[in-house]
Amino acid sequence: MTAMKKTWWLLSLIAILMACEVKPQEIDYGHDACHFCQMTIVDTQHAAELVTTKGKSFKYDAIECMLNDLQHWDEAPVKLYLVADYGQPKLLIDATKAHYLISESIPSPMGAFLSAFESQPMRNQTLSTEGGEAYDWQSLQENFDLKTQ
């Protein structure tokens, strides 16, 4: 095989592998629409995103939209569950490891008052000042009052 053919095959292989990479897509705040409710995503503290095993990204304006969408999920299996860290707007963190707070003092886009935090101490500090109820990923899925829109 000639050097040119080897280079072409190597570049083709790299391109194929990069196209199959499972990673989140950046949310274009003010332009992207929520996959569940179709509202424009503007709130950088409450956005969420799912990425399937096939690399397809689904963006949400609120964590509650993502949770509602998961109730009727008929896409490829989810590889990444991501939520915005309330204390670090635009930073998407692993939803399965996040610490959640439902507090009527902190409105979220769809009215569930649901926020996510990367660290438990930050969530607990916000809980002590704002009140509400604390959850982890498992208890959130078990206890959140999901509403079909």
Image (cartoon, rainbow, N blue to C red):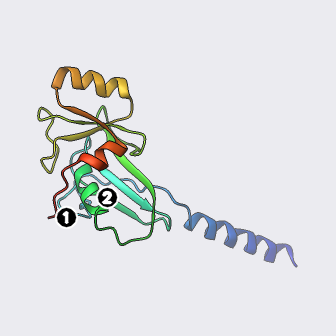
Left/right placement of residue 7 relative to residue 72 reads: right
| Residue 144 point in image, percent of width and height | 22, 48
Which label is found at residue 59?
2
Question: Is 97 in front, or is 16?
Answer: 97
Question: Is 38 in front, or is 103?
Answer: 103
What is the quadrant of the N terminus in the image? bottom right
Q: Earlier in the sequence, mark 1 or mark 2?
A: 1
Residue beneath label 1, please? 38
- Label 2 Cα neighbours within 10 Å, binned few <14 / some 14-19 / many ≥20: many
Q: Rounded to the nearest whole Å, what is the CA distance between mark 1 and mark 2? A: 10 Å
| Residue 70 point in image, percent of width and height | 31, 61
| Residue 22 point in image, percent of width and height | 52, 60
Left/right placement of residue 74 relative to residue 111 reads: right
Residue 37 seen in this snapshot = yes
Question: Is 38 in front, or is 130?
Answer: 130
Left/right placement of residue 88 relative to residue 126 reads: right
- Label 1 Cα neighbours within 10 Å, binned few <14 / some 14-19 / many ≥20: few
